[in-house]
Each structure stands twice: as structure tokens, then as C-alpha cells.
Image (tube, rainbow, N blue to C red):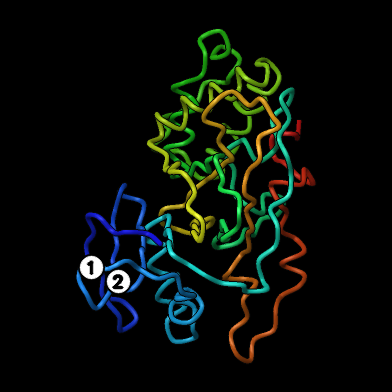
Amino acid sequence: MHEPRTAATLEFAGRRWLVSRPKPFVLVIMGEQPAQPGAAIAPSDYLHDILLTPEWREPFFQLADATGLVVCLNLSTQHPSYRDVRGRSSKGRLSQGEYYHHDGCSGPTKPRFVEIRCPYQPQTRSIATAVAPHHAVVAAMVQQLPAELADTIAPAPLLESMSAEALDQLQGQITRTVRRKLDAEGARAYFRRVDLAADAYFEPWQLGESRLIANANSGITMQHRRAYQDVHSGGVANGHLVKRWPNEELALPGQALDTALLASFCSEEDGACWRSEQA
């Protein structure tokens, strides 16, 4: 159970929630406010039982759109829509998931959100997941690029004036350069500097935690990556993560899933597609 320390309250969906705002783009929901002040919050499936019900789903999604990252703690659920996050990192090569990315990068339409979850399980997870606004990520990638590599990047206009598509193109160019010119641990060290410069959220995973990441919207669109905070030596047991695209994969009553749209999305973990691989 998670013991709340300093928290505010949020009135939403006819309930009072204990929340915190560790960063401007992060809202952490600890659970419903206990009847007794200071009492521990018991795990429950408040995400499906309350926040994703037909009445409150779209208001909750709009809250996530406006925030960027909504973290739900003390979440106990066995919902069948989650699937395992695929892909593993090696000591000699970064996995696709270690680079900052949006989910669904293969097509023009991306999932509105990606939800990544650390289920209750015997093994905790020590590998972080870094999340930051797309614009801040690209700006940090430019800022932290080693001087000997900066000359290989085509000059760009002011980042503030660049479209999302232009940011994607510049980011892909930098990622390709880093992949070619730096060894695995050099690239990981570079992205750790990017994490800090972008003020990314990479708090350790708690068991029973879900992170709802705004992946494609007109507001605070985010990117995320698997983030080793130390040298990746391998052979370390770690808890596993699961994921889903809740806006597209959870059908409302009377609504059929758009299977063609779901098939057009790709996983950042399986290596099936990656924009930076393209020439």
C-alpha cells in the first residue's frame, strides 16, 4: 500500500482524490481520499470502475490530454486488454524502446494515449520509463548532442517555431546519428543527459501503477523511452510491464473496435517499424 505524504485533493467524477503534481505535465492520482485522514490507501480498480466508465471516460481523457501524463497508483486490476511489453535491451545495442518515441509511429494516425502499467508481481522493476513533452525532448537532444556530432546535423530553425512533423524529422536525424556514431553505453549516457535536460519524469515504478501518456493530441503531446539509469550489465531480474491504447482498444457500449486502425499501429518494442531507420 502507498502511504500518502504531501498531497492535494482533486474533485473529479463525483469523488475526492488524493493527488500530487511533481511536474507541471504530471498528475499523480494516489486513489480516493480515505475516510480517515492519513489512512493508507487500499489498492482498488478505480481506473475501470470509475474513471473509464462511459460517463467519465471522455472527461478523464480530456484531463490527460491537458496534463500530458496521468499516473495512477494503488491500482489493482486484471483487465484482459493489457498485453506484455515486448522487446529486450542488449549490452551491445540499444533496443528501439530506449529512444524517445511516440507509439504508433508507422502511420499518420497515432493512438491518442498509451497506457503502460507495472502490475502487482513478486519482482519489482528497477528500469525507469522516462516521459517528457515532445518539444522539450527534441530541444534537449539538440542541446546535449556532443560537439563532434553536432556538425553532422543539418541546421534547424528555432525549435519554438517548428511543427510537430519538423520536430519528428529533426529528432529522427539526431537519433540516426547517435545510433551510428556512439556505442551502446555512450548512447545511453547521452539519453540520460537528455532526460535531465528535458526535465523528464522517470520516477521508479511502483507495483500497481499505470501511466497514461498523451501520445497524440493538440495540446501537450509526450514521448517516452525505456531509461537505464546505470550501465546496462544484463542478467538483472526485473518486473515486467504491460501496455494498451485505451482510447482505441476499450470500446464504449454499442461501439465496435476499429481493427484496421489497431493493425496500423506498431509497437516500439518489437522493432517492426522505427522512423529513424528510414534513409
Q: Amino acid at mark 2?
A: Trp
Q: Is residue 131 above or below residue 44?
A: above
Residue projecting furthest to the top: 148
Between 90 and 197, the one nearer to me in the picture: 90
Left/right placement of residue 90 relative to residue 141 reads right
Provide residue 19's location: percent of width, then percent of height: 29, 62
Residue 114 seen in this snapshot: no
Helix, strand, or loop for circle 1?
A: strand
- In the shown orientation, is residue 270 left or right of residue 60? right
Q: Residue at x 54, y 14 (%)?
A: 150
Please name the amino acid that badge 1 sits on.
Thr
Find numbered disc 2 in the image and state the secondary structure of the residue it sits on.
strand
Residue at point 47%, 73% (across, down):
47
Q: Which residue is mark 2?
A: 17
* Residue to which mark 1 is pinned: 9
Q: Position of residue 214 (x, y in %)?
A: 49, 57
Front position in the image: 141 or 35 = 35
Horizontal side, residue 184 vs residue 192: left or right: right
Q: Is residue 122 above or below residue 180?
A: below
Q: Residue at x 23, y 59 (%)?
A: 7
| Residue contact between numbered discs 1 and 2, judged by CB atoms under 8 Å | yes
